[in-house]
């Protein structure tokens, strides 16, 4: 991870990633059944467009969806970076502590009980995710929250949740099963401003908490004993970071379902490009994750239009080759 | 400065210490030596409050080690271990900067004072030229100097070294031990080190603590008093000849195989 990181470790990450984010944003707004040029978009935004359809498409559908993609992508990437550091595990992703299983179980329970209305589903998923997180932490606490106990109990709680989930699906009539599977594959079509206003505060506060813990995250990567010797109160820092990253994940999973790959690989890519220091890694991952998911979502709407490919398929198809290429490029 | 009284400690596998007493004086170099598994590293962990004694106390300036916050302890004692996790490609400067963590304000970041200290200790340990190199690219000797720099960045009156030089080659072992001696002379840094290099320990230490394999103090005192063939035989179960190097001004230990031991 040497040459690349060394040459790009400068301030230059900020304009670069902001630029990419801007391009992804415009691209995502212009793609869909109604094709819009950059000029059309400008027209809509400065209120010069006299086409009410364009106006409605942008403000009612594409803008909330694009913003949601950005928020979800940013949150998953930041949470992934935090979990990878605290657990010192490159395979850690935001779902590692059973958050995904809990959220899925919550959502499917709500669908099964017939509460699939707009706000019930995310609410139930959020509660399910928090319950899973609390259970995992409570079990691991008996072992002073050591990272492998956390991972292990996260995996077990996740399996328990999926078993219950499969049982519920087996009990459910077919149309409910379809609704559940649609939710489980992850999608951004629920986007509306009401949902955005509901999850944005969680994401923003959690991000600020994690960013304030940047130096603690740096210390965690050195091993817990070393971190303690360098003056970190491990227990307090770990609880803060888990709570922030866990709630961040829970809130986005509750509105977007399970979108894989972003939280696992975006932090790795950013580390390879700009180094591992969290002061830079967290905001850079947020920008890159947002751009990546906006782009992937736009593609998922464009490739088989008017049908949508599940966005998780696109994230993996786009991200995996790029990640492999970077790994290959970096002889370390 | 550090008082250990009636220290008891057990792992699940059995007791390590059963009533150990020791006073560590400010400004001394104390080397802990003894067979593998006798509890030297455990002792260092008990000293700095990473582990808590089952009975007895470790006191720093009269207060129990466990009553200090990690941050307060990190301002009193810095640690250099034998091996390090280098899975993340932090640059050398970023690694050394971590040593300033205990001085960081609650909100906010490092100041010019922190940067100055980092520059100073990187110069002392001769790693300035490695500043931008990622940790993943360093050789063992370079990494160990960087870790020492990080410990020095903590600016502590006490340094605890856990076999910090044992996998280094001869020249690096010598440069680092010279550095320690210089620190001790110039800044009165108290140094407590676990070492398997008895000769080097004899050369630089004011006192040697020889552990027996059941965690008892077999001998404690000046190198020449501790490193006698009887005491070493008793603890390590190896016959040795004790020589003396006039140039180093310290005893030298030559292990003997059973066939080499003269009949008495």
Image (cartoon, coloured by chain):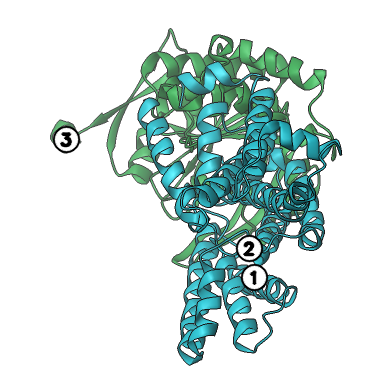
Whole-angstrom CA distance, mark 2 to mark 3, is 79 Å
Q: Do the residues labelled 1 and 2 touch (CB within 8 Å)?
A: yes
Q: Are marks 2 and 3 in contact (CB under 8 Å)?
A: no
- Which of the 4 image quarters holds residue B96? top right
Give residue B251's position: percent from left, percent from top: 42, 21
Chain of residue at mark 1: A
| Quarter containing the N terminus of chain A | top left
Give residue A85's position: percent from left, percent from top: 58, 45
| Quarter containing the C terminus of chain A | top left
Do the dots labelled 1 and 2 sit on one chain? yes
Above or below, A220 against B129 in this view is below
Query: Circle 2 — which element?
Result: helix
The numbered mark at residue A129 is 1
Residue drawn where x is 62% and y is 15% of the image: B122
Residue nearest the observer in this picture, B41 or A102: A102
Rendered hue of chain B is: green
Q: Name the residue under label 2.
A: A253
Q: Residues within 10 Å of mark 3 (few under 14, many from 20)?
A: few
The number of numbered badges drawn on the structure is 3
Q: Mark 3 points at which residue?
A: B263
Chain of residue at mark 3: B
Q: Do the residues labelled 3 and 1 touch (CB within 8 Å)?
A: no
Rendered hue of chain A is: cyan
Residue nearest the observer in this picture, A124 or A235: A124
Give residue A163's position: percent from left, percent from top: 46, 81
Residue drawn where x is 80% and y is 30% of the image: B109
């Amino acid at each position: 991870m040497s040459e690349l990181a060394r040459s790009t470790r400068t301030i230059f990450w900020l304009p670069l990633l902001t630029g990419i984010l801007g391009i992804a944003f415009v691209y995502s707004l212009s793609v869909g059944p109604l094709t819009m040029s950059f000029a059309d978009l400008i027209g809509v935004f400065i209120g010069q467009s006299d086409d009410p359809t364009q106006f409605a498409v942008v403000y009612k559908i594409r803008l909330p969806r694009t913003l949601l993609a950005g928020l979800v992508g940013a949150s998953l990437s930041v949470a992934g970076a935090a979990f990878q550091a605290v657990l010192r595990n490159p395979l850690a992703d935001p779902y590692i502590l059973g958050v995904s299983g809990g959220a899925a179980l919550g959502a499917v329970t709500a669908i099964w009980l017939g509460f699939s209305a707009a706000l019930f589903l995310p609410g139930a998923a959020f509660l399910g995710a928090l319950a899973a997180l609390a259970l995992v932490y409570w079990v691991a606490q008996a072992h002073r929250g050591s990272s492998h106990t956390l991972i292990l109990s996260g995996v077990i709680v996740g399996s328990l949740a999926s078993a219950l989930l499969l049982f519920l699906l087996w009990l459910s009539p077919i149309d409910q099963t379809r609704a559940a599977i649609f939710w489980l594959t992850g999608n951004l079509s629920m986007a509306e401003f009401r949902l955005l206003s509901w999850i944005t505060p969680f994401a923003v506060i959690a991000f600020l908490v994690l960013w304030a813990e940047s130096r603690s995250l740096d210390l965690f990567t050195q091993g817990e004993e070393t971190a303690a010797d360098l003056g970190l109160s491990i227990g307090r820092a770990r609880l803060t970071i888990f709570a922030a990253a866990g709630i961040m994940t829970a809130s986005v999973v509750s509105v977007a379902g399970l979108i894989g790959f972003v939280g696992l690989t975006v932090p790795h890519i950013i580390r390879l490009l700009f180094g591992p220091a969290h002061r830079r890694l967290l905001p850079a991952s947020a920008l890159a994750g947002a751009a990546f998911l906006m782009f992937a979502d736009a593609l998922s709407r464009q490739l088989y239009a008017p049908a949508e490919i599940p966005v998780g398929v696109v994230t993996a198809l786009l991200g995996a080759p790029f990640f492999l290429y970077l790994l290959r490029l970096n002889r370390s | 400065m550090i008082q250990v009284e009636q220290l008891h400690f057990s792992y699940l596998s059995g007791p390590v210490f059963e009533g150990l007493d020791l006073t560590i004086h400010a400004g001394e170099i104390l080397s802990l030596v003894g067979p593998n598994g006798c509890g030297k590293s455990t002792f260092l962990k008990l000293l700095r409050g990473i582990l808590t004694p089952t009975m007895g106390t470790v006191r720093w300036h009269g207060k129990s080690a466990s009553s200090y916050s990690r941050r307060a302890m990190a301002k009193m004692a810095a640690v250099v271990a034998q091996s390090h996790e280098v899975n993340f490609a932090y640059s050398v400067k970023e690694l050394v900067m971590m040593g300033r963590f205990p001085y960081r304000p609650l909100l906010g970041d490092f100041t010019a004072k922190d940067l100055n200290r980092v520059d100073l200790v990187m110069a002392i340990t001769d790693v300035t030229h490695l500043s931008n190199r990622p940790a993943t690219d360093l050789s063992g000797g370079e990494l160990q100097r960087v870790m020492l720099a990080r410990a020095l960045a903590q600016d502590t009156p006490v340094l605890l070294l856990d076999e910090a030089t044992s996998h280094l080659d001869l020249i690096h072992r010598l440069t680092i031990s010279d550095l320690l001696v210089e620190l001790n002379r110039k800044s009165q840094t108290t140094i407590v080190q676990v070492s398997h290099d008895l000769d080097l320990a004899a050369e630089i230490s004011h006192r040697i603590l020889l552990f027996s394999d059941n965690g008892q103090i077999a001998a404690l005192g000046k190198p020449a008093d501790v490193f006698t063939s009887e005491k070493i035989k008793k603890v390590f179960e190896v016959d040795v000849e004790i020589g003396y190097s006039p140039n180093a001004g310290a005893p030298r230990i030559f292990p003997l195989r059973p066939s080499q031991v003269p009949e008495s």
